[in-house]
Amino acid sequence: MGKEKSTLAEKINVLRAAVMGANDGIISVAGIVLGVAGASISKWGILISGLAGMLAGSISMAMGEYVSVHSQRDAQIAAVAREQHALDTDFSGQEQFLKDKLLQTGISSHLAEAAVAEMLAKTPLKTIVREKYGFDLEKKISAYAAALASMIAFPTGAALPLLAILVIPTTYRILGTMVAVVIALILTGYFAAVLSHSSKLHGTIRNVVSGMLTMFVTYFLGRMF
């Protein structure tokens, strides 16, 4: 059971990193290529700037995911060590913490004492960590897997606006690229909302609006210069 939980947690984390990496790739490179297209009609300049943004973004996203997940894991390890020490030196204090927490839910003192005794008799460290910090000792995530997923997903998402602006005829390439990017942002915004258990409609709209704002700002800045 523990192995299954760990595997599920890792898969969800990797999927989250992949979706966010693809989303950032779409928005970042769309902003870059539209900004350059606003200032120049050179496909060579657009291609070089897009590829440079894709490479820099892929490395940046991978390092960011690695540092973020590793920092979270380090914080969890430190919390586990603190709670193990607390259980060894002040077991009654931990019992009282759990009892007080249960009493706040409205149950009787007798039931709270019985529940705490049962919880701490089986898995004391797992129980106290879950109740104090909200994470499960058995659900581990990998910084390397998250970094790799993000590094692969970013250029995958970034390829869409870059290919669109290079392939679509010059007359329609700005509008065509924006339409392609909006469709992609609808998909990534929806899946990001599913993974975070938030409102799918609000998450999708927020993602599309932020992407469109990025494209409009960079394009008109390019036109100005």
Image (cartoon, helix red, strand yellow):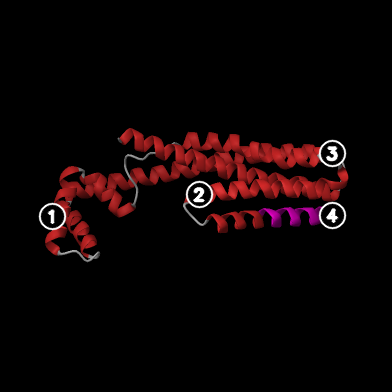
Label 3, on which residue? 43
Identify the mark at residue 223; answer none if there is no mark: 4
Mark 1: secondary structure: helix
Mark 3: secondary structure: helix
Percent of width and height locating residue 77: 34, 43
- Residue drawn at x 59%, y 46% as measured from the top left: 188
| Circle 3 or circle 2, nearest the eye | 2
- State how far apart marks 4 and 2 are (Cα): 37 Å
Q: Earlier in the sequence, mark 4 or mark 1?
A: 1
| Circle 4 or circle 2, nearest the eye | 2
Mark 2: secondary structure: helix
In the rendered image, the quadrant that contains the N terminus is top left
- State how far apart marks 1 and 3 are (Cα): 72 Å
- Residue drawn at x 84%, y 57% as measured from the top left: 224
Q: Earlier in the sequence, mark 4 or mark 3?
A: 3
Instruction: In the rendered view, tell whether residue 196 sits above or below residue 43.
Output: below
- State how far apart marks 1 and 2 are (Cα): 38 Å
**Amino acid at dot 1:** Ala
What residue range appears in magenta?
A: 211-225
**Amino acid at dot 3:** Lys
Q: Are marks 1 and 3 in contact (CB under 8 Å)?
A: no
Label 2, on which residue? 194
Q: Earlier in the sequence, mark 3 or mark 2?
A: 3
